[in-house]
Every structure is written in structure tokens, then in C-alpha cells.
Image (cartoon, coloured by chain):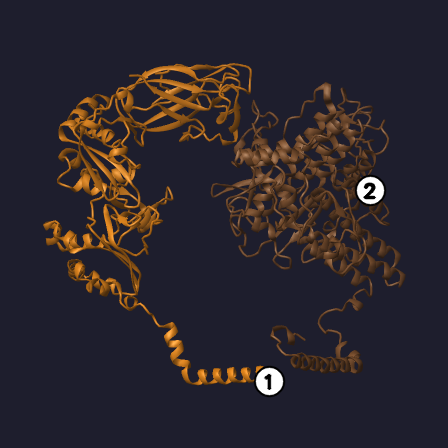
Chain colours: A brown, B orange
Amino acid sequence: MRLGKNIIIKRKSDIMKIAKIQTALLLLVAVVFSTGCQKVFDIKPKDTLDQSQMYQNVYDADAAVLGIYGKFMGLADRYIILNELRADLLDCTQNADENLRQISTHAVGVDNPYASPRPFYELILNCNDVLENFQKMRVQKKMTESEFNQRYSDIGALRSFIYLQLGIHFGRVPYVTSRIKNVDEVKNPDTYPVIGFDALLDSLINFTEKLPYKELYPVGSNLNITVDGYQTQKFFVNKKVILGDLYLWKGNYQNAAINYREVMETGTQGVANGQYYSLYKVGWDSNGDVDHYISYSRAGDASTLIQNTQWRIMFEQPFGSSGFDREWVWVLPFDSKFNPENPLIRMFSPIGGSYTVRPSQLVTDMWNAETQRPAQGGSIPYDARGLLSTKQIGGQPVVMKYLYNYLNFNSLLPVNPLAKTGKWFLFRQTHLHMRFSEAANRSRKHRLAWGLLNSGITGAFPAPGSDVTNFHNTLNEAFPFNFDARNSGSTGVPFYRADWYRNIGIRARANLVDIAVPASDSMLNIETNLIKETALENAFEGTRWPDLLRIAIRRNDPSFVADRVFNKLIRSGVSSGAASTARAKLLARDWYLPFKW
Amino acid sequence: MKYKHKLQLGALLGAMILMSLGCKKMTEEHNAIGDPMLQKNVFEVISQNPSLSTFAKYLVETGLDKELASSKSYTVFAPNNESLILLDATVRANPAKLKQFIANHITEELVRFSNATPKKRILMLNGKYNAIAPFSIESAVSTQANQYASNGILHTINMSVNALDNCWEFMAGNAAAPVKQRAFLQSLFRNVFDPTNATIVGINPTTGEPIYQKGTDSVYTNLFWRNVHDLRDETKQFTAFILADGGWDAERAAYARFFPTGSADSTTFATAWNIARDFAVDTLYTPSGLPDTVVSKFGAKLPINKSSIVASIKTSNGYVYVMSSMPVAPALRFATRVIEAERYSGVSHDRRSQTFFRDRFNDLTRRPYSDVLVLNHGIALFNLRYDIPEVPAIRYRAFWVAVNDFQTATFTQRLGVGSPLSTLLPYVNVVANTRGEVFLGEFTLTTYSPVLSLFLTAANSTANAANPLVCDYIKLVPSL
């Protein structure tokens, strides 16, 4: 019906003629529709599923869950760029484009694709759609109550996680929980008013707390199986971790600690074996593939840093191996065998990728400022996690954590140049312990927090003699701060092997000396050190900006984030003017990206 | 509507007629090369230009005309007839030299001249490099730039670009170079072991090492190329010095006392070698940019007295300065040697599992360092060996940094000169937590050593507390 558009109409009769033709055509269409409509047009496609046929049984529901997670994986590069490049551990290389530089220097333009909230909302609307359909299925008895509970809670918790990300990066966002077709409707402030971060946290806690099921998919479920060589259990968000995070942001330390503690006790069931004592407990197992220590084959000989197992191996280990399972809480795999394609090799690798981001000079300096535990006299004057988290390739510093399934750790050459396998790391036990400690520290359990950070619970509550009955524990505290780590050794009387006896602490595991705490200001000091330790241990794993921002908000001290970003920029060679501008912006509490697309 | 219909019909008819009739010709004309010059190759363009007739003649003479008529791409910098009148008669008479000279004006790189042409060196057809800049090559200026041909670009230039000798060709081959140092450089040709192209004829049953066919296991090469700089390399740029005979003799006479050996001949050689090896650096210093001191590859500081420069020779890969004399004080020539202890050449016993390469932070210097510690090795007089090349017969002051941070008890170790048991230097105490340099004593070498072995020797004891070895670095300071 675009007839009239390009013709310059000069005479009235022409208009009449066009009108006649239009009428005729309209009539024809009307006739076609009224008579044959149903049969002519409503043919169901043969090779794709129509929406009306989509949700028939639990297998369809499982497909919907996996579909959501497949789409979620499309956010991997964005997640890392926003959470790390905005903070101080990740920096741009010469290959980085203007958009990445804007993110790094906090000078984000409105059309910067990395700063668009649209992909987050697309996924949220997909979640909303799936959640509503799940509810319909329950009503229509297409799923059992327990099947519904598991799947509904999973997608609900994932949506809360995405909203938390939106809150962290955009501050004020619309909270949409209903099903809408067009993502652009989200921008309509009349229908969906924007709410502040704090109000958003309230809504999210309210929603997530009410989810009917907070455990993992049980063994025997179709979502806890091995497919394509991948054990799927770790694919899915841990609901209690999300709840813990929400409470921690909100400042409800008791509830945060409760949720984190419940995850820390995941292994405490069944037979008392290695898994019982070390799953999510930062516990040893006398097996390099499980311990994940920083260690040397001969202590004191710096040239013997162990790389083929121990700390580095956790990034290379396959899904389902015990070392992997005891460390990681939430990981998604990228594999050349299935979509989506791995975007992380493109970001990080100079081999087979475009190498747009690199470790900042600041994080290198942070690792180099640490001191290891003495061996053969003095101490090695750096944190060896730096040597394993990054490597020099062709004289350039490279973030290696995401590349160990692609590049051989020793030769630094691709195992198979075209098979770009890798993992998206979201959460592991060190995050868990650091955040539990953060909550514990704010709940005035300073020594417990210090212990989990340094040399474990036994290190914080040492026993003077062989009778450990009244030491190695915090059983005088109420849940969630009551740990029993009593270990009598093989000769001590009475004999103890308590649930937490293998816990060794984050810094002991990394072979670093304990942090001394001044008596005058233990709380802030421990908190700052917890955040620093997460940087050293979990650098580039997508939690740095939230960590800095959370503390800045909690202490009402914008310099906590501003100074660190400033230091990164200054040491990376950005002009002092640009660095100062970024600092001033963050000092003025202008932490958020523009909510535009 | 009718009006429009007619128009459309007409247009359609017109298009059909055009298609059927004129189609072929139209496309031909569109794709045809309009510039007649682009139908000719570079050689044809040159030969049609009367002001380039001499150059064209030489191209034919040297056979390069066929090259320029081929389908590769070239940039030709063609000197005009007037400039070629000045061509050296020896070059003109020698076909090989003439070809070198002509090929020095042709490159396979496409060079378009503009004000933004980057300054760089380009590879010419004769293997040499010439510097280009906007509208110029070396000192020649383009009079008519950017004439395009089917297989390249032609620039007419106002001056020919001579194919210069490279640094090595001048220093070792040119009659204008001073005789004695030139003869010395030529005397440095040796057959040097190099199994790259060797034929293996067997395996030694006792050592397991390959046996090479005689004559294939070595290359005939020059020591200067291998051990100092390969001055033939056209891709790099060098600055080299060559002494007039008087200056060369004076310098050798002054230095002979530092290189005493068993025979007069070898003393003469060692002296000359140790002087000559400092006379080339892989940095380009033009006559105007020549600094007052040049530091050689071996750490010698050569004072440059500009009034001693007899001639500055521009070569294809740098500059050679002919000096009337270039006296270098021994204190400037003999550099301090720092030997990193963890990079030893050998050990007296295999004690790798008692050897620790430690990374540490030095509170005194505020710097991280790596050192070596051998602990609990159980061998009296256990030692690490360091091979140091080309050590003159002078007096040295010795120091080390040895950090004993692993035991409170003091222990002793010694620097053995030439032998682990040498008593030139005494056993020195290694006191706990001393992080500074410790003076070990002075020693005098009476003969020149092509390779001097130093030994870090542990105490003559099997007790673990008494015989550790630890060292960050050893420093030998010439005491002149």
C-alpha cells in the first residue's frame, strides 16, 4: 500500500484513482482473510516450535531453563568488562576501542554499547515470560509441584542476580516482573517507574526470599546430569549465594551470614570423607588437584613454583572433577561443540583473540607487595598467584585465568587453535568465605573473620597444649558464627576431628603471611584486607567493582573506590587529567552508568 | 496515472533497446584504462622519456630492463641524463658494479611520494637499503614524482644514488681504509664449528655424541661477525671506527702489557682483538650527532676526539670513522664485571635438590633480587663455577652480596680465582642478615685469560651449619 508515496500528485482525478485502487486492494485482502484465514495462514511451522506448543511437560520446562542460561552466557564479556574494567584490576591494551577506554576511564558516552542495559532487560523479559508460563503449567498440572518449585526458583534467582547487576551499574532502574513483548516498553517511566538501588534491593530480597526452593537441582533431575562431557550442576545460580549477596548489600549482616553459611555447609552431609571436610570449606585434602595451594616442589626455591597442579589447576580442571567441584560454586562452560561462541578468548588472548584487555599495573604491584611464608631463610617477596593469574606472552601481560583451557600453561600455545573452549567463572568458595567474613566482621566477629582470611579457624583460636577441647572453635557463638574446627592431631586426648578441622584460610592456602591487625581499628582494617584479598585471589573474576562500590556505600566513603580507580589510571599511563576527572566523578558519588539505549 | 504509465513504458523500452544494442560497448568503455601511461610497463615509460635515455641504456646493458618489464611491481628512482654524466668511470667499466649501481635505484616496494611520505629505509633490488623522505631518496630530490605505469611507479630524480660499501666492505676491503687494522680484520677468518648443515656419519658409542663428516661440520666465517657485530648486515645500522696505522700501533703498544700470554704471537693477537672488538657499535651516529663517548658492546667507554677524525665514510649501513688515533685509558676500557651468582656455569657435585633459587627483597637497596643458596649439601669444598670471557691481566677488587637470612650462625665461603682451591682471596665470613656488598680483597692476574673460571667455594667442612653457599652476585672492579 505504498503506492501513493513516491508519486507527485497534481490532479484531483489522480487522487480519486488511487483511492479506488486502494479500496479494491483492501477489499481483496479482506475477502482473503475472512474466508481462508484460519486454514491459509495458521499452519504451524514444521521445524520450530510455536509458542503455544512450547510448555507441554517438564522436559519443555527444562529446555526453557537451559535456553535462559544459554542467553545468559551471551552476557559473559559484558559482565567481566563492567565489573572489572570499571574497577582497578583490569586495564585496556592498545588494541582496545574507544568504548572500552570509556569504560576504563569512567567517561562513558550514551551510545557506548557496553553500557547499554538493554541486553540485561531482554534476558529479564525472557525470565518473566518463562516464570509466567511455569505458573500456568503448574495450574494446568503439566509439572509436579516439586518440579515447578525447582525450576521456578532457579529462573527467579537468576533474574534477581541480573537485577542486582543492573542496580550495581545503573543505580536507578525500572523493576519489571511481568511479561511484556517489546523490550523498549521498559523505558516507559509511566508504566515502569525507576526505583533506587536500595528500594530495588528490598524488592529483590522480598522476591528471592519467597522462592519456594533454595537448594541445588537434586541428583536424578534432568538438570543435574552430564551432557557433552559437562556435569551441569554448577551451571545454575546458587540461590542462597544470591540471597547472601542481597542481604550483604542491604547491610543485613546476620541474614547474609546465615545464607552464606548454609552454602559453606553444603558438603556437611553423609559419609565424613574428603568432600565432607573440604567442599566449600577451604580445606586441604593432601591432593594437589584438590588443595589448590600456592606451593613449591621445594619450599624456598622460587624456580620450583608448582604449575601443573595446585592453585592454577582450578581454572583448567574439568567440570565434575573433585577439585573443580569443591572450589567452584557457579561456572558456565564455553565449548566449540555448542553455542554461544567463547567471547573471552577474543577479549583476553593475544593468540587467537584480539587482546583488548590486560591486567593493570596496579594489580601487579599489589601482588608484588605481598610476602610469602618464610622458607630457607627469608620470604619470597611477592604473591605467586600473580604469576599464575597472568603470564607474559610476547612481552605483554595477559590475563590467563580464562585461557587455561585454550593455551597450554607451559608452552603458552593453543592446545587446538580452533577449539576455543573455556569457562565463565562466576563464584567460588573464596568469594563465599570472604563475603561471609565481611558479614561476620560487621557482626563484631572480628577474630573469626580474621581467621577465615588468614590461617583458618584453628589459626585464629590456637590451642596452647594438646587438649583442644576449648580451643579451635567458636561454639560459644550462635548460628551462623558457630564453627567447630577442633583437631587434636592423632595423639591428642581427647580425640577430635570436627567438621571444620581442615579449614586453612585463604592466605595460608596462598602461602602468604598473616595480616597483622592493629588493636585500635580492627573492623575497618579487616574489612579493607578482606576486599584486598578478594582482589589478589579472585582478580578478573567479575567481582571487583561490586566489592569496591559496596564498601564505598557502606562506609559513606567514595574515596574507597575513587582512589583505587585513580591509581590504576595513573599507573596505566592515562593522562593525569583524565585520571583526576575519573576520580572527581567517583568522589562526587557519580558511580552509575547512564540508563540509556 | 496515464501520464506516468506512458513514462514508465517509455523508460522500459529505452532500457531494453540500450541493453540489446549498446551493452557491450558501454561496459568496455567503462572498464577501459583511460591513462595511456598505465598501458605501459615501467621500462617502456622510462625509455620513452628522452631525459632518462642514459638510465634506460644502462638498464638494457645490465639486463634489468627485462626485470622492469615483468609483472612484479617496482618503484624506480631514475636519475636524469645530466646526473649520470658524473658516474664514476670504474663503475661504468665494471658490469657487476654497474648492475649494483643501477639496481640501487629500484625497489620492489611501492613508494608514492607526498608530503606525508614517512621517513624510512627501503630495501633496494641490490640488497642495500636507502633512506626515503618526502620527495627524496638519500640526498637526491625528485624532479618529477609519481608517474604511474602498469607495473609500478617512476620518480625522476636529480642525482644518482651510489651503491655504497657496507661497513664491513669498507673496513676490511676498501683500499681507502687504513692498512693494519684492515689486515687484522681480514685475519679473523676461521673455520668455526657449526653443525647446522653438517652430515652425521655416526654416533660415538661412549659419549653418544654425533660424529660429523669432515668438512661439513664447520663454516668459514669471521670472528668479528660472530662475536661482535655482523657489519655486513644491511638491515641494521652501525657506527664503526678504524684507526690509522700509527694510532693502531700506538694503541697496541699501550695495551700489550695487559695481555701477557705464553707467546709473543698470541699476545699480539689478544691485544689487537681486545682493542678492535670495542670499535663497532650497533647504533647509528652521524657525524653531526657523534657523542663525546661511545659505549661498546663490552662496556668500554670510548672517548671520541672529533679532531682525530680523518675521514667520515658513509656506508650503506652506517658510518665508519677513520681516526688518526683513539687512545682509550685502561680505566675506561676495562669495565666492572658483575656476575649473577644464580647463573653459574657448573657445579662440583650434583646438588640440585639442595640448591635453592630464591626470590627475595633487599631492604637495603629496596629492590627485589634472585640469588642462589646451596644448603645441607654435605660436601667439603663444594663449589659453583663461573666462566668469564676475555679477562685482562690487571688487578681486581672483588665484592659479593651474600645474604645469610637462613641461619644465625656465621659461616665462610671463598671466591676461588682460576681454581676452587686458589688462595688469592681468603675465606670471608657470611654474617647473618648482611645485605650490602662485602669486600673480599684484591687479586692480580698475571696472564690474560680467554676464559677465566671463578669458583664460589664452600668451607672445607661437611657440617651443614658451616658449609652453606649463598650469593646474589659477584662484582669485579678493575683496580688501575
Q: Quadrant of residue B310?
A: top left
Label number found at residue A355 = none
> SS for tag 2?
helix
Residue at image mark 1: B2
* Side of A501 relative to B261 (left or right): right
Task: Give the image location of residue B327, x and y in percent.
Answer: 21, 24
Nearer-the-camera pick, B258 or A422: A422
Which chain letter matches label 2?
Answer: A
Q: Is residue B192 left or right of residue A559?
A: left
Label 1, secondary structure: give it. helix
Q: Which residue is mark 2?
A: A202
Q: Where the C terminus of chain B falls, by quadrant? A: top left
Q: Alpha-carbon neighbours of circle 1 within 10 Å: few (<14), some, or many (≥20)?
A: few
Looking at the image, can residue A541 be seen? no
Q: Would you say residue B82 is visible in this rendering? A: yes
Q: Position of residue A32 (x, y in %)?
A: 76, 82
Task: Identify residue type, mark 1.
Answer: Lys
